[in-house]
Image (spheres, grey):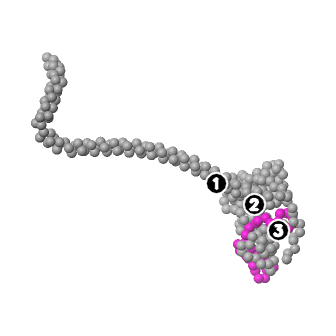
Amino acid sequence: MGTVRRGTWRSWLPLVFLILSILFLALHETRVLAPLERGLQVILAPLQRATTTLIRDVGDLSQTVRQVRELRSRVAELEEQVNALTIENVRLREYEAEVVQLRALLGFVEANPTWAFLGADVVGRSACLTAPCADVVGQEPNPYLRYVIINAGQAEGVAVGMPVVTGGAVLVGRVAETGLHTSKVQLITDPGSSVAAILQQSRATGLLVGQPDGSLRMIYIPQEDSVQVGDVVLTSGLGGVLPRGLVLGQIVAVVKQDFALFQETVVNPAVDYRRVELTLVIKSFQPLVQEEPRE
């Protein structure tokens, strides 16, 4: 019985709501509910404004979240582009550095068209000046020996004693040992190295020798010759072992004693041998057998 009554009551609800709606509409049109409506407006206005503000803020927050997601995606894309450009920039700098070295070597080759050359890369170093170097393929047991290893050997026509240059006319050293496709080049800074040298400005001659600390000294310079700091040291070509005019270094200090027969100079090498990458092996050249008369 109770269930039947609840079902009957629910069936009348639409009709009741319809009648009430018509009643409220009629009262609204006749302005009877005007005071009540104004009171409700006063009460509900703050709530309406708060609801509107809340909805707007939620919309703004949703838009902000969407923009943040888009920005994150954009930032990720830009980071990928930056990484790619950084790698490309590094490659271009490597190419630029290699081009500079090749241009210098090419200029040296063009300046000596009668000589025979062979290009080679430095692939290893032995007994570096201060610390182990990168790309070391072997270590000399004698700490005073200093070499660079190039990727050209007997198969390419390299022989012991051949001069090796870099950066144009800068002398690296001479080939001390050859393998089938590699050679060991004794640096001029090695204590066992000695090179007949001449000063570019004063034309004073002497012998450039390597020191245990990796520096250079020019010895046996006549006491009466004028020697100045900053003068460039070149190969003199005496004896025909090396070409004349290769750059060795620059004088940074003069050691002169009043009662000594000769004076000495401290020479800064023309190149940092730890950073040499490209070289030229001079396979043949026109040797200077006798020294030109000095004025």
Whole-angstrom CA distance, mark 3 to mark 2, is: 17 Å
Q: Residue at x 15, y 39 (%)?
A: 37
Q: Quadrant location of the C terminus?
A: bottom right
The crowding category of the residue bearing disc 3, from other C-alpha atoms within 10 Å (few below 14, some 14 to 19, many at least 20), is many
Residues marked 1 and 2 touching at CB (< 8 Å): no
Label 1 amino acid? Answer: Arg
Q: Residue 103, percent across and down?
A: 73, 57
Query: Which residue is under mark 2?
Result: 168
**Element assignment for label 3:** loop
> Residue furthest toward the bottom?
258
Q: Does the magenta stretch include residue 265?
A: yes
**Element assignment for label 1:** helix
Dot 3 or dot 2: first in sequence order is 2
Q: Residue 274, percent across and down?
A: 69, 59
Q: Which of 143 and 120 is in front in this view?
A: 120
Query: Which residue is under mark 1?
Result: 93
Query: Which residue is under mark 3?
Result: 236
Q: Is residue 64 magenta?
A: no
Q: Residue at x 17, y 26 (%)?
A: 18
Q: Residue at x 70, y 62 (%)?
A: 272
Q: Residue 210, percent across and down?
A: 76, 66
**Element assignment for label 2:** loop
Q: Quadrant location of the N terminus?
A: top left
**Label of residue 122 in the image:** none
Q: Can you tell which of label 3 and label 2 is closer to the viewer?
A: 2
Q: What stretch is highlighted in magenta?
A: 238-266
Does the rendering let one see residue 47? yes
The crowding category of the residue bearing disc 1, from other C-alpha atoms within 10 Å (few below 14, some 14 to 19, many at least 20), is few
